[in-house]
Amino acid sequence: MMYMCYSGICAELRQSLNILLLLIFCDLLFRRPRYTETDSAKCVDKGHQQLCISEERIVYSAFCCNITLRSKSYPVGLGKTHPVSLTLQETTLFPADKTSNHTKSRVNMAFSSLTPQGNPEFVRIGEQYKCIVCKQVARDAMATECGHRLCLPCIDPMFQEAKEPVKCPAQEDDCVPIFRTKIVPDPGGRREIKKLLVFCPNKQYGCSTTVPWRDLEKHMSECTFCPVECPNKSRGCSAVVARNELDNHQKRECNFRPVMCTYCKQEFSFMMIGNHEENECPDATTTCKFCGAGPMKRREIQGHLESCPRKPKECRFKVIGCTYMATEEEVSNHEINDGVHHMEILSIFVTNSDLNRLQLINQIQEIAAERDGLKRRLEQHKEELASLKSQVEALKTASKDAKMRMVSQTERIIQLERKSEDTVKRDVMERCEQQTRELQVTIRELREKLTLLERRPATGVGSSEAGVQVRPEELNDMKQQLTMHDRQFHNLDVRLAELDLRFQVLETASYDGILLWKIRDYTRRKQEAITGKTLSLYSQPFYSSRFGYKMCARVYLNGDGMGKNTHMSLFFVVMRGEYDALLPWPFQQKVTLMLLDQQSGQRHLSDTFKPDPASSSFKRPTTEMNIASGCPLFVSHSVLETPTYIKDDIIFIKLMLDLSNLPPPNPANQ
């Protein structure tokens, strides 16, 4: 038994030596870099009680890209006290310089050569030949540990999207996580893929051949259906025909094929040779078209035509209408013998000339009269144009004056509003209300006294009742006081109404860059605009922030400028505010003008514009408000005056300010 164990060990050692010799042979044969083991077998421990004997087998993949050394270990007993354990090991040999780009590139080039180039149409592709990533035929096929195939170019994107290990894209039950180093080339799969049948790319030209993918390039070099360009392309032929039809096309069908002229022996295209021989070739033979002499070459015929006795000649009286044409001798006889005929022709010619002259004179006179009329009309137009210019200048001046007056009135209104805003407080309101109540009490008491006095019987001066004595003078004084109090009470009512209106305006002011303007009594206000009583309306002011820009809206219900009488015009106005010195100028925030839909809420009409920094409308105001800027043709009356936008004779206008990139007030802007 001991002998059998040692025999087995010797056999293992001999096999290991054979493997080492095979490694050296492969290294010399393929001139690969020297290989080193990534993992070596362990030997006998310190006590020499365990012996490691390996059975090494080499798995050599195509082109020596890697060599896997698998080791099996068997437990071998060397007696009861000296057991021998042969350990199973797996060692993978790689080039010594694992990071060598040169080595990797050589490996990639070697394996990429296994997959043919191109993208042909396959007869049938089995699922086992498809890449699990791109679902196309696997190019430079690689294999995962779980046996799936994928393209070599698909590996890098798969690991760029996730960290190792990545989940197998096949997502089958027996799939395992994939490590980049565990993906190995699949030579067998590549051989099978190369054998897949593909259609010839010239299928559309009639070739029905199917060949293995690896033989496609060879077939293409021999395929008779391969499309080729006509050799007469330089002459103008753009035809592309199959290779097996090229000879017939070139010899019989091509209109640009070279053909030699029968006479001058020069080459011309087939489509031009007929015209050349019939009309252009100087060596072509022809006959005289007058006398029939010939045949002679075309270059000689011209000299003959000039001296041909049968060449036709025109009558000298052709200018007056004679159409006779014959040989020179016959024309001479005609001129001598047909004098009467020529006199008749001459008489007709003179008569026609006189008629033509009279017609020309009449036409000239008509043209002269028309010219004089046009001159008179031109003078009238000039006078009318001058009058219109003067009227336009007058209208411009009047319009400018009206605008100045309007601006002046607007400034007065705003100044009054500012004064009221600066002076009116809540405590003033409360005091006014208290005074009003006191006056009401006083008036009520005075009225009661007056009523009591008027009910008492008139007993003369000094009369009394219940100890009360009132003289007529006192009664008149009390009536005057009552009248004065009534007047004061009325003034207080007016003042309270004004203050209430002012507080309503202040309470409706917004500080978020949004204005919602409710305009009541649309019909009445539009009629006032039509009659010129109130052309435009101003909204309450609104602000971009508590200390931001001050703005308002201005509307012309009957239109302004181009929109007069047809549209509602809506404008945006920058007003002078309390904190303008702290704000950036010119005003540059985007503005949206909007007419709200009161029916469905989905058909709002809006227009958005970006302020022009060069316009005076957006500079820092030096008066109470800048010139308005907006849309003269904001909405037509036909669209506006519908239930969609007018309800209960009310319209809603909304202005929105784009507050993005709006800096806060900055003292540096002063």
Image: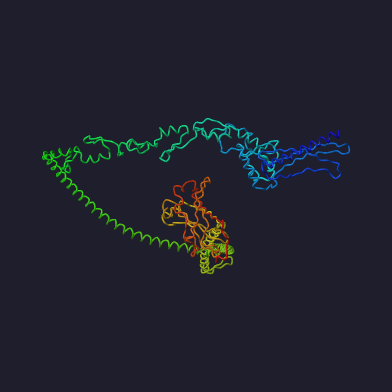
Which is more toward the observer, 663 or 478? Answer: 663
Return the residue nearer the eye: 521 or 213.
213
Q: Position of residue 437 (x, y in %)?
A: 58, 62
Left or right: 370 in relation to 461: left
Residue 22, image x and y in percent? 72, 39
Question: Could you say which is closer to the camera, residue 524 or residue 52?
Answer: 52
Task: Please state, as top left, top right, bottom left or bottom right, where the C terminus lies in the image.
Answer: bottom right
Residue 453 seen in the figure: no
Q: Quadrant of residue 271?
A: top left
In the rendered image, the quadrant that contains the N terminus is top right
Image coordinates for residue 375, horizontal then vertical, percent: 25, 55
The front one of 487 and 155 is 155
- Considering every residue shown, the one lying at the far right of the view is 81
Please give left or right for residue 25 compared with residue 381 in the image. Answer: right
Would residue 172 be visible to someone looking at this image? Answer: yes
Instruction: Report x, y in % for residue 114.
Output: 61, 38
Image side of residue 641 versus residue 68, left or right: left
